[in-house]
Amino acid sequence: MDKRNDLANRIEFTVKNLMVLVEPVKELWIGIETNTIPWDICAGWTVVTGVALALRVDRFLISHTRFIEMYPYYPILYKIYAFSVMTAPLWLWAWLQVKRKRDKLKTLTHAFKNSGLQSNIGRLPDLISDHALDPMIRKMRLTNAGFPLGKFIEQTKAIESNLGIFIDTIKENRERRSVDIIYSHYPMGDEVLYSSMETNRPFEFIVGQTRAHTVTASFKDIPHLMVAGETGGGKSTYLRQLIVHIHLKHKTVRFLLIDLKGGLEFSLFENRTQFVVVPSVLAAIEQLKQINKMLDERMAFLKANQCKDIDSYFKKKEKTRTVQLNRHFIVVDEAAEMFLAGHHAKGTDIQAARAILSRVARQGRACGLHLVVATQRPDSRSLDPQVKANLTGVICFKMMNDSSSIAVLGNGRATDLPKIPGRAIWKNGIEMLEVQTPLLSVEEAERLMGPADASPKEKPPQVVEDVPEKSEDQEPANQHEGVETD
Ligand SMILES: Nc1ncnc2c1ncn2[C@@H]1O[C@H](COP(=O)(O)OP(=O)(O)O)[C@@H](O)[C@H]1O
Ligand SMILES: [Mg+2]
């Protein structure tokens, strides 16, 4: 009996020791997958120690100590030694992760006991993994220990206070019998007012507030935007804020606002000189055809002036520029209504509208035309793939299922979002951040915009301005929009 116990103890001891080796390797693997390893430090260390080893600096230093006896002269031992020295920061990093995880497990055990998440037979949820999703957000995966999801959700507040974290979402993976907790060590407001955020650089717009800072971006870098997410997420509110912001900063920018779902979202912009608000598919198609014509004219004009885009035109003709080239924003709320508008318009007209939006998305940047498209559904029927491919900045509010989130962001981050209006993922290239988008109420927007034009009928808003060929009768160049000071 004693012998058997002894053997069991030895096996347990060996397994434990092997785990000491396996765990850091596992952490390294997760680090590579999530790109959280400090590569720059590791690479720097490898280069420096590599050079030192090649110059035999190590042997020189050790030869002055009594450890010279231990220096690995056998080739195989020397290789292991050199490899360990050169990759030391990697192993140190991995070991730190293991330690952090063990500490967390200890705290978790305590927290779950306090939160009542311990079954009658003493089972507790166990930590499977815990890693960063971005610099602010982490994802912890636990075994469910036989508890239903509801039990975890019930204990949200208790888990938060016991672990000192702020939980965004708790999700279940029934097949794996695991639970994912998306959390952060930093709090995030449920509401951020537009008035509390500032950006004064030309053509910069506010994306939102992360747990640490305000995120802004520029239409010069990101010419076209997609705003995605399910109803109630905050798409129309974001568009309202964006339009008001651009209008206040650049009074000469013109807007074509297409809202086919009720037409109420943009009513505050009606009867204003720089705005055209279209509530029907047919009117939208008509306006888009004019935009198409303007795109042709602008391209020809820029070519004639040997400029690759309007920015170079503005720079080149700083002194002599006399032609006004206003920037135009085409904002489409509920884009699917237009692309799926089968019974409201002829198929050929819808095809034409699709083609124009796609062209604006591809060529608009150079001519000062920007596209902002909001949609609930990111599939190819609701939003033209060519348009989608060119909407490089993406603000994605909560999505109910992973497939919609993957279609927009390439991963399930939008399903992980909490159900808070205005909470979104901002995607720009490979960067992905959770933000709370600015809230601007209709009343506040109306106040900022000031009164609408008194007699709109006499002064119809004009969306397309021709590029004049003669320039004598134009205003001086420095009064024109487009003189950007950045
Ligand atoms: N950034 C925000 N912050 C706080 N609340 C918001 C925010 N955006 C939207 N909301 C709230 O959510 C509601 C729905 O927003 P809305 O923009 O109409 O969503 P969507 O257009 O996606 O259906 C709004 O009436 C508002 O009360
Ligand atoms: Mg809406």
Image: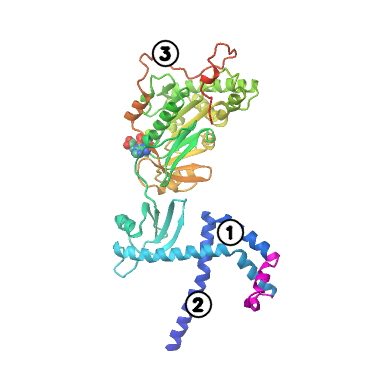
Circle 3 packing at 10 Å, graded few (<14), some (14-19), many (20+), is few
* Marks 1/2: CA–CA distance: 31 Å
Residue behind mark 3: 459
Is 61 within the magenta? yes
Circle 2 packing at 10 Å, graded few (<14), some (14-19), many (20+), is few
Residue behind mark 1: 42
Callout 3: helix, strand or loop? loop
Q: Main secondary structure of the magenta part?
A: helix
Q: Is mark 3 within 8 Å of ligand 2?
A: no
Ligand 2: image quarter:
top left
Q: Residue at x 35, y 57 (%)?
A: 164
* Marks 1/3: CA–CA distance: 66 Å
Q: Residue furthest bottom?
A: 2
Q: Nearer the viewer, mark 1 or mark 3?
A: 1
Mark sitting on residue 14: 2
Which quarter of the rendered picture does the C terminus lie within?
top right
Camera-nearest residue between 252 and 294: 252
Mark sitting on residue 454: none
Can you say whether 435 is above or below 264 in the image? below
Callout 1: helix, strand or loop? helix
Callout 2: helix, strand or loop? helix
Circle 1 packing at 10 Å, graded few (<14), some (14-19), many (20+), is some
Instruction: Tell me which label, 1 or 2, sits earlier in the chain.
Output: 2
Give coordinates of residue 477: x percent, y percent. 55, 19
Q: Which residues are magenta?
A: 53-73
Left or right: residue 216 compared with residue 316: left
